[in-house]
Amino acid sequence: MRRIVILTGAGISAESGVATFRDADGLWARYDWRALATPEAFAADPDAVHEFYNARRLQLPQVAPNAAHLALARLQRDYPGEVAIVTQNVDDLHERAGAAEVVHMHGELAKARCAACGAVVGWTGALSRADSCAACGAAGRMRPHIVWFGEIPHHMERIAALLAECDLFAAIGTSGAVWPAAGFVEAAREAGAETVELNLADSEISARFDETRRGPAGETVPRWVDELLAGEPVASA
Ligand code: OAD
């Protein structure tokens, strides 16, 4: 049975209207990540960090999955093998497209975490220092359930196990600028997997892939999924 591991990044949600990070109009071109996406920033100015993530959390109900999210959910449902979706994205568009299971390595906007006891709870509205933990009662310790720079991504053991056993690895809409995700293609190659990158433009690691497909994810991903479901060879281009 064939095992596919798919890594997605901000580019897959771009056509849904969710900003990417490193494109010309990306979040890190407009905001300083050092002041918003580090544990030190949260300690120094929690209100600013909450405001940044609240705006993004409150955007979620206003955006919808696009053709690429829907195609991956279809692949997970219909492919006669295992399909794991690992995402760096903190939005919930894979789930809302119907994906059965999504491994969120950088956390989730729709959840909050208590810095005192570690409890993780669903959170759809704004989060602030006024909020208390429903599990332990600690006041003012709730934080976005987001992996910040300098923190260890979630589910790394699970992801390593998936990569060690995969036959096909695909990276979709990610710049390859952030580790450890940028190294997944090497881990997959070591496992003997075929590798394919689907991206609008060259990424920092395009040369590492057996095959690269250029174009907007809303067009390239459904086509790629159609080929996989039709049983055509993956490295056909
Ligand atoms: P980036 O913003 O770094 O890269 C987005 C990639 O998507 C680029 O390579 C674009 O060329 C590509 N892209 C843009 N629009 C696209 C489209 N319509 N179709 C296909 N590709 C498109 O985003 P990530 O690689 O996801 O971490 O960034 C990785 C991490 O850096 C994020 O998870 C975030 C950030 O700091 C945290 O917040 C922890």
Image: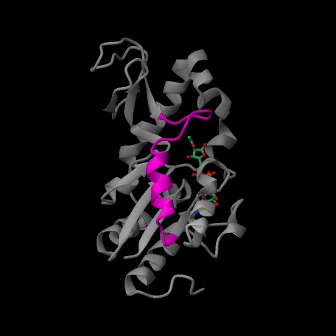
Q: Which residues are magenta?
A: 146-168
**Magenta stretch encompasses residue 165:** yes
Q: For the image shown, how many numbered marks are present on the structure?
A: 0
Picture layout, residue 178 above or below residue 77 = above
**Magenta stretch encompasses residue 167:** yes
Picture layout, residue 27 above or below residue 219 = above
The answer to whether residue 199 of the structure is visible from this angle is no
- The picture places residue 6, in percent across and down from the top left corner, at 48, 63
Left or right relative to 161: residue 186: right
Q: Residue furthest left?
A: 134
- Residue found at x 35% / y 65%: 73
- The picture places residue 35, in percent across and down from the top left corner, at 65, 27
Left or right relative to 227: residue 208: right
- Residue found at x 69% / y 67%: 208
- Residue found at x 56% / y 87%: 236
Q: Nearer the viewer, residue 56 or 104?
A: 104
Residue 84: quarter of image: bottom left
Left or right relative to 49: residue 23: right
- The picture places residue 76, in percent across and down from the top left corner, at 34, 67
- The picture places residue 83, in percent across and down from the top left corner, at 39, 66
